Image: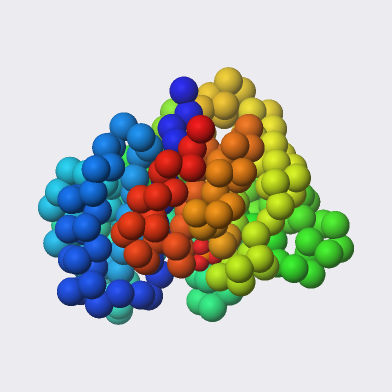
Amino acid sequence: MRKKILAANWKMNLSFVEAQAWLSQFKSSNTTKNLVDFQLYAPSLYLQSLAQQEVLTVGAQNVHPKESGAFTGELSISQLKSVGASSVLIGHSERRQYFQESNFFLKEKVDACCQQDYAFIFCCGEDLETRRAGAHLNFITDQLQASLLHLEPAKLSLLTIAYEPIWAIGTGETADTTQINEVHAHIRQLLESTFGEKGAEVSILYGGSVNASNAQSIFACPDVDGGLIGGASLNAQSFIELAHCFK
Ligand code: 13P
C-alpha cells in the first residue's frame, strides 16, 4: 500500500517563534496521524526543536552528500540525524535553479541517503518553456534517469517522489488534473519498468500552488499520493485542512 503523504515545505519562511506557534497549533488541532502521514520540511536551524514531538515527521530542505569535512555552511546526513530530522528534500527546483545543483550532484545526494538509510523526497519537474515545447515527459525522464533510477530496489522504501512543475510553484497557477495525471502515470510507469512490482509502492506527490480549493481534485487523481505544499503550509490550520481533501 502506498502511503498518503502531506508534506509542508516552509522554504525560507517563518521565524523561530512563528515555527513554534505553528507546531503548537498543529498539535492542538484534532488532526489524527492516521488521516495521512504528515511531514514538515523546516529551516535547518529549527529542526532540533521541531523534531521533539511524535505528531509529524520533521525533515531538512537540503543536505550535502559528504559525511563531514571542509564544506562551510553545509550539513551532512549524520548531522541531520543527530538532531532528530528523519528525512530530506533532494532536487527541489529552487536548489537546481538558484544554487546550480546538477543532476550529478543530486545523484550523489541520493547515493548518500541510500548508503545511510535516510528517507528522502526526490523532486522533479519542468519549466514553462519545456512544457510549451511538449518536451516535459522526456525532461522528467532525464532528471530521474540521471539522478535516481540507478538506486537498488532494496532502497526504494526510502524514496518518495514529488512532481513539481516549476511554472506552478508559488504562481497560483496549478497544473490541471489532466496534466498531473499524465506526468504521474509516466513517473509510475518509469518506476515499474525499472524496479518491477516494487516501483508500484513508491508514493508520488504533486506540488505547485496546492490549496484547500484545488486539493480535493488533485488528490483524487489515481497516481497522486499526496502533496508537497509551500505557501499553503505556512499556516498550520490551512495545512491541516488539506488532509481532509483526501477521499
Ligand atoms: P507552493 O505551494 O507555494 O506553490 O510551493 C510548492 C513547492 O515548491 C513545495 O516544495
Residue 128 vs residue 8: left or right? right
Q: Is residue 212 visible?
A: yes
For the point 50% across and 49% down, which residue is it? 227
Q: Nearer the viewer, residue 46 or 191?
A: 46
> Where residue 130 appears, x then y in whole percent?
78, 64
Residue 54 appears in which quarter of the rendering? Answer: top left
Compared with residue 174, is residue 18 higher up or lower down, i.e. above or below?
Answer: below
Q: Which of 222 and 143 is in front in this view?
A: 222
Residue 192 vs residue 52: left or right? right
For the point 44% across and 36% down, which residue is it? 4
For the point 23% across and 68% down, which residue is it? 19
Q: Nearer the viewer, residue 5 or 122?
A: 5
Q: Residue extending furthest right?
A: 133
> Where residue 199 appears, x then y in whole percent?
57, 29
Residue 225 vs residue 73: left or right? right
Residue 78 vs residue 237: left or right? left
Q: Can residue 151 be seen in this view?
A: no
Compared with residue 104, is residue 194 higher up or lower down, i.e. above or below?
Answer: above
> Where residue 157 appears, x then y in whole percent?
42, 33
> Where residue 8 appears, x then y in whole percent?
39, 57
